[in-house]
């Protein structure tokens, strides 16, 4: 059979065959290959997991050489950190009062703030509700249904008009 007996392929068919790829097709960039290989290595995985632990609340401590580079912590910052860690560990009236008395800004953690809505003291609830409102308005929306349930419970038991107004504003911002 001679070469002339085969039907000729159109340009479209030739382009489609080339686009399908194959062994001689597109060659990968060497730097891309190196990045992919590095991201799959065990050392890189260990590095990433250590970094994740470092940035999680209550996670790993900074290595000694990095702590030395940052300088010593003041007693005030150590006390504020201890108060925040206590608040994260056990979110209740006592730890919230201690955090507010120490002038510690409430952390931007919707889950923690939603849990603090169980606090009965309305004077303590005001800053929690205000911080939650700020977070919701900034787009950091917590678990919507849980927050709605907690806000309804706050409305049932609260008598302070400011607390009720803040709860209504949060509820409106969720919609």
Image (spheres, grey):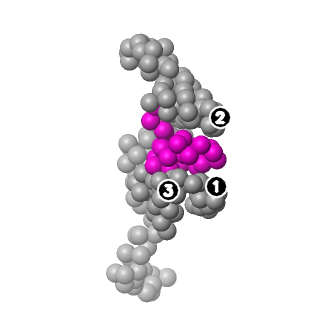
- The residue furthest left is 11
Q: Which residue is mark 1?
A: 157
Q: Mark 1 or mark 2, which is nearer to you?
A: 1
Front residue (pair 47, 2): 47
Earlier-in-chain disc, 1 versus 2: 2
Q: Which residue is mark 2?
A: 90
Label 3 neighbour load within 10 Å: few <14, some 14-19, many 20+: few
Q: Position of residue 108 (x, y in %)?
A: 47, 43
Number of the label disc, if any, that sits on residue 161? 3
Q: Mark 3 or mark 2, which is nearer to you?
A: 3
**Magenta stretch: residue 123 in it?**
yes
Task: Tell me, yes or no, if residue 130 can be seen here.
Answer: yes
Taking the image as shown, residue 145 lies to the left or right of residue 35, namely: right
Report, in whole angstroms, how far the alpha carbon at label 3 lies from the one at label 1: 12 Å
Report, in whole angstroms, how far the alpha carbon at label 3 lies from the one at label 2: 28 Å
The residue depicted at 37 percent of the width and 81 percent of the height is 12
The residue depicted at 48 percent of the width and 66 percent of the height is 172
Taking the image as shown, residue 139 lies to the left or right of residue 61, namely: left
Q: Quick check: marks 1 and 2 in contact, CB under 8 Å?
A: no
Q: Position of residue 107 (x, y in %)?
A: 49, 39
- Magenta stretch, overall SS: helix
Task: Tell me, yes or no, if residue 141 can be seen here.
Answer: no
| Secondary structure beneath label 3 | helix
Residue stretch in magenta:
104-131
């Amino acid at each position: 059979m001679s070469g002339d007996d085969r039907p000729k392929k159109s340009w479209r068919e030739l382009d489609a065959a080339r686009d399908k790829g194959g062994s001689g097709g597109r060659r990968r960039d060497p730097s891309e290959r190196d990045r992919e290989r590095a991201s799959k290595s065990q050392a890189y995985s260990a590095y990433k997991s250590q970094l994740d632990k470092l940035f999680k609340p209550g996670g790993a401590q900074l290595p000694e050489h990095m702590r030395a580079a940052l300088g010593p912590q003041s007693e005030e910052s150590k006390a504020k950190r201890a108060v925040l860690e206590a608040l994260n560990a056990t979110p209740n009236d006592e730890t919230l009062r201690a955090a507010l008395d120490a002038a510690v800004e409430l952390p931007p953690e919707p889950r923690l703030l939603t849990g603090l809505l169980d606090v009965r003291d309305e004077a303590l609830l005001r800053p929690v509700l205000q911080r939650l409102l700020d977070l919701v308005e900034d787009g950091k929306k917590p678990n919507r249904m849980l927050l709605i349930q907690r806000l309804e419970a706050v409305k049932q038991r609260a008598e302070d008009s400011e607390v009720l107004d803040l709860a209504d504003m949060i509820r409106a911002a969720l919609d």
